[in-house]
């Protein structure tokens, strides 16, 4: 019996999350949603909301956490495909853009609340982006053998480029998005090449100083 109650509770919680997502759009932000609107969409009484979330902000923070986890899982799967012989940058960008095309509402939430008035929202989104960047840095370090500091700097720059491209993609047609994907891939490849050149020159300078000392 308790098992059935747990399943029912999780189903209701999921219905509230989906109801909030369904009402987000280019015209409607999460801040504009009311508790009554969400519960009406979910098909439950407003008083039942508080059995699952403390308030609307708690519901929003759950959306942020779930979206970050989903994106990281997709990128991990992308890296597995890369290990099978795919292009690292192309596969990653295409996977990211696929996430946006399927989750436009949640990505708009991330963009809007990243600089919104809620400190908790800003902190949660910053945390998710940091997780995303850290996993990318670990991958770069493992594949390229670059030092941790350089891998983190490169990862941060790549994440900024990709997220900015994602923001542009939201209001584009399919053809425009395709062009944006190619542009972003070129930018990331140029960034990667620039890091390689910088490290090589740094190593040459270090070797010159070492030889001069001898």
Image (cartoon, rainbow, N blue to C red):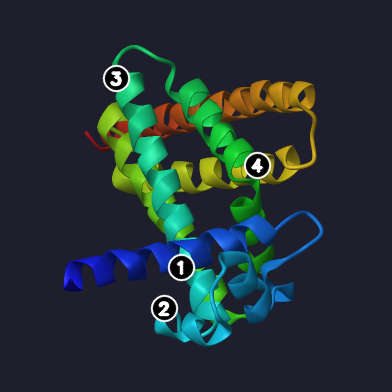
Choose mark 2 or mark 1, whichever is in front: 2
The Cα atoms of the two marked residues, 2 and 3, are separated by 41 Å
Which residue is at 40% across, 33% downward? 205
Q: Earlier in the sequence, mark 4 or mark 1?
A: 1
Is disc 4 placed on a helix, strand or loop?
A: helix
Of label 1 and label 3, which has the lower sequence position?
1
Q: Which mark is residue 83?
A: 3
Say which of marks 1 and 3 sits in front: 1
Q: Which residue is mark 1?
A: 62
To which residue does mark 4 refer?
166
- Kindly identify which residue carries mark 2: 52
* Quadrant in which the C terminus is drawn: top left
At 39% across and 62% down in the image, what residue appears? 11
What whole-number distance in Å separates the C-alpha atoms at marks 3 and 4? 25 Å
Please name the residue shown 39% across and 52% down the image. 69
Left or right of 24 in this view: 200: left
Q: Closer to the camera, 99 or 44?
A: 44
């Amino acid at each position: 019996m308790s098992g059935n109650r747990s399943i029912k509770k999780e189903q209701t919680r999921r219905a509230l999350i989906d109801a909030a997502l369904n009402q987000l759009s280019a015209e409607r932000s999460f801040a504009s949603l009311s508790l009554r609107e969400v519960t009406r969409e979910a098909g439950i009484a407003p008083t039942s909301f508080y059995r699952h979330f403390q308030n609307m902000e708690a519901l929003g923070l759950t959306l942020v956490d779930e979206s970050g986890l989903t994106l990281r899982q997709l990128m991990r799967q992308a890296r597995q495909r890369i290990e099978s012989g795919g292009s690292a940058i192309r596969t990653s960008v295409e996977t990211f853009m696929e996430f946006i095309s399927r989750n436009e509402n949640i990505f708009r939430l991330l963009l809007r609340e990243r600089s919104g008035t809620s400190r908790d929202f800003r902190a949660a989104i910053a945390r998710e982006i940091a997780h995303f960047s850290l996993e990318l840095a670990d991958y770069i370090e493992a594949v390229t053998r670059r030092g941790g500091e350089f891998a983190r700097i490169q990862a941060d720059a790549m994440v900024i480029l990709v997220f900015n491209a994602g923001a542009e993609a939201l209001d584009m047609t399919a053809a425009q998005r395709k062009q944006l994907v190619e542009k972003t891939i070129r930018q990331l490849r140029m960034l990667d090449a620039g890091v390689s050149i910088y490290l090589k020159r740094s190593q040459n300078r270090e070797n010159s100083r070492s030889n001069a000392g001898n």
